[in-house]
Image: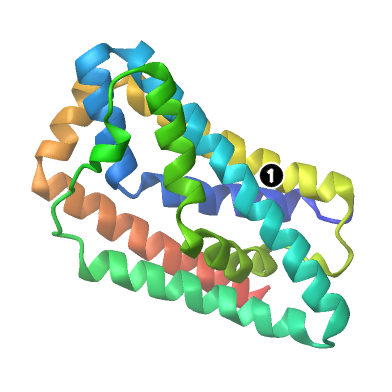
């Protein structure tokens, strides 16, 4: 492997911060848990996590090719990553009071429907690959990635949202109260926003 444990830990930390930001997947998991318990929610969590493997893989392969073709492209992408995190953090803070809306595609009943919805919400979002293409170069030097490096990156991209979403689904009562409180959602968004800005600063300084 060419990537270090520190780089993996920093990337995992960023994924955790992103997960902490309440959004439609949170609302869908809560709705499915309330209607059918943990059994109804875990297929959606699995689907989301599997979808989260694809985009990092596409981004790593695409960025690795671009780096091989254009000298200095890696440095450019590093500062793109800084900008992405700064803008995401600022947007979260600015829109911290926005209400959460459930996506009806994610709340259809049935295990298979839940799994497919989880995959579809990630695969059907072309912004995801742009996000990963802008973010991954800030954490890893993709100019010489190996198969083991890609496995490590994709494994983290899979495990962090999966564990987070399963814990979320299993904590229905507490999370339900949290999402009903506009003040609590605002605090989480503001905290996550500043943490994302902090990640951007760390990337820029390393």
* Residue that appears at 86% across and 82% down: 69
Where does label 1 land, which residue?
Answer: 154
Where disc 1 sits, the SS reads: helix
- Name above or below for residue 140 compared with residue 27: below
Q: Quadrant of residue 148?
A: top right
**In the rendered view, does 110 fall on the left or right side of 154?**
left
The residue lying toward the viewer, choosing from 137 and 174, is 137
Residue 199: where, in percent of width, then height? Answer: 52, 64
The residue lying toward the viewer, choosing from 66 and 74, is 66
Residue 24: where, in percent of width, then height? Answer: 28, 45
Residue 55: where, in percent of width, then height? Answer: 61, 53
* Residue that appears at 43% across and 21% down: 112
* Residue that appears at 29% across and 47% down: 23
Say if residue 166 shows up in the picture: no
**In the rendered view, does 5 fall on the left or right side of 181?**
right
- Name above or below for residue 87 compared with residue 6: below
* Residue that appears at 72% across and 53% down: 6
- Name above or below for residue 49 compared with residue 129: above
**In the rendered view, does 136 fall on the left or right side of 17?**
right
């Amino acid at each position: 492997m060419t990537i270090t444990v520190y780089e993996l830990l920093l990337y995992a930390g960023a994924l955790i911060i992103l997960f902490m930001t309440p959004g439609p997947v949170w609302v869908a998991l809560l709705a499915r848990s309330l209607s059918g318990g943990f059994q109804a929610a875990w297929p959606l969590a699995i689907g989301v996590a599997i979808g989260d493997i694809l985009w990092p893989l596409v981004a790593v392969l695409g960025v690795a090719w671009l780096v091989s073709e254009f000298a200095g492209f890696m440095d450019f992408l590093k500062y793109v990553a800084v900008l992405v995190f700064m803008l995401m953090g600022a947007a979260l803070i600015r829109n911290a009071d926005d209400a959460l809306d459930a996506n009806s595609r994610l709340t259809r009943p049935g295990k298979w429907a839940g799994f497919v919805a989880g995959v579809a919400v990630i695969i059907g979002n072309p912004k995801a690959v742009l996000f990963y293409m802008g973010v991954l170069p800030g954490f890893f030097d993709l100019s010489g990635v190996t198969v083991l490096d890609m496995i490590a990156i994709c494994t983290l991209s899979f495990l962090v949202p999966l564990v987070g979403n399963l814990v979320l689904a299993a904590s229905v009562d507490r999370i339900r109260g949290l999402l009903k409180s506009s003040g609590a959602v605002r605090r989480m968004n503001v905290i996550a926003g500043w943490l994302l800005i902090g990640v951007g600063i760390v990337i820029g300084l390393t």
